Amino acid sequence: MTSADFQIIAEMEAAPEAVKRQEQLLPAMLKPLAVRLQQRPPIVAVTCARGSSAHAAAFGKHLIERYLGIPVAAAAPNIVSIYGQRLRLPGQLFIAISQSGMSTDLIEQAAAARASGAVTACITNDAESELARQCEFILPMAAGPELSVPATKTFVASLSALARLVSLWAGNEALSRALRRLPDRLAAASKLDWSYLPERIGGADSLVTVGRGPTLAIAREAALKLKEMTVLHAEAFSSAEFLHGPVSLVSPGYPVLIFTPTDAAAASVRQLTTDLRAKGAALFTTDWDDDPDCLPTLPPDHPETDPICLIQSFYIMAVRLASVRGTDAGQPRHLRKITRTR
């Protein structure tokens, strides 16, 4: 690996400190929002994000629906910015997620949501950004500067911020305690050895990532990073959706990377794993057992924070995979750090 590779790994390894900073910074900002949501619970929550932030929003959807029973929908930003139609969201929750807070379509959607009477919040790494100015509640990622183009540290910080919001809103002390343990577990996850995976999939033309429940967002993020950082085409599926057609792709030369959750969804994911092994798939899984083919993971701690540790281990591996494939993980071709869309 090059010095640039070690630089991006060092940035990834700073994620635990970002999560630790949130523990000091976010409670004072989260409490007024949580109180507002508890006093006047929304009927629906709407998220607005793109790229890695959209995958973070999918994680937030799982958390809000799982612990609060409130349906969560992803808004299409261009409904406002291109088509000029405003969503009717009086009293509902609107959450925008953006590391830079500079994308025009997200800014316009947030402004329209607030004007319609929504409770607007944004998770951003720039609390002075235009997106932050358009939202009533600002939840800083507290990730610090991220110089590499692919969002990694900020993605982890986004997941942590969403989990903190839900733990406070739902009054879930078990999740709050798990978040306090998360920085140390992220540091440990950075050191897990996934080095044999680049050797096994480095020559592949395409790959599938699979998750369910809290790991579906992780599978989607992993597929994006494989495209960005390693120029390896990857698609993400729910383990249930994978059976509705995509399973036909399975062959010994078509790798499948499974992110197994540590909650009630694990049983169905393990059943898919068993079925794919019987079909001769080139299978790699994060299931925590004694199978020598499993990627090393930390012992389960909490089903909502365990997946955050999985993506941390994956990120470190992806840099090594990029090196094997001869790509620049920190500066992917055709991409810039800040993407402005409308």
Image (cartoon, rainbow, N blue to C red):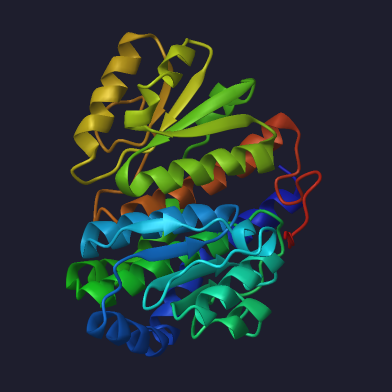
* Residue 156 horizontal/vertical position (percent): 48, 61
Residue at the extreme right of the image, as rendered: 334
- Asked whether residue 191 is in view, the answer is no
Q: How many numbered marks appear?
A: 0
Q: Nearer the viewer, residue 70 or 274?
A: 70
Quadrant (top left, top right, bottom left, bottom right) of the C terminus: bottom right
**Whether residue 263 is situated above or below residue 35 in the rendered picture:** above
* Residue 5 horizontal/vertical position (percent): 70, 49
Quadrant (top left, top right, bottom left, bottom right) of the N terminus: top right
Q: Nearer the viewer, residue 62 or 193?
A: 62
- Asked whether residue 5 is in view, the answer is yes
* Residue 73 horizontal/vertical position (percent): 41, 56
**Whether residue 36 is situated above or below residue 59 in the rendered picture:** below
Q: Residue at x 27, y 62 (%)?
A: 70
Residue 288: image quadrant is top left
Residue 32: image quadrant is bottom left
Q: Residue at x 31, y 10 (%)?
A: 278
Q: Nearer the viewer, residue 23 or 267?
A: 267
Residue 223: image quadrant is top right
Q: Residue at x 52, y 69 (%)?
A: 96
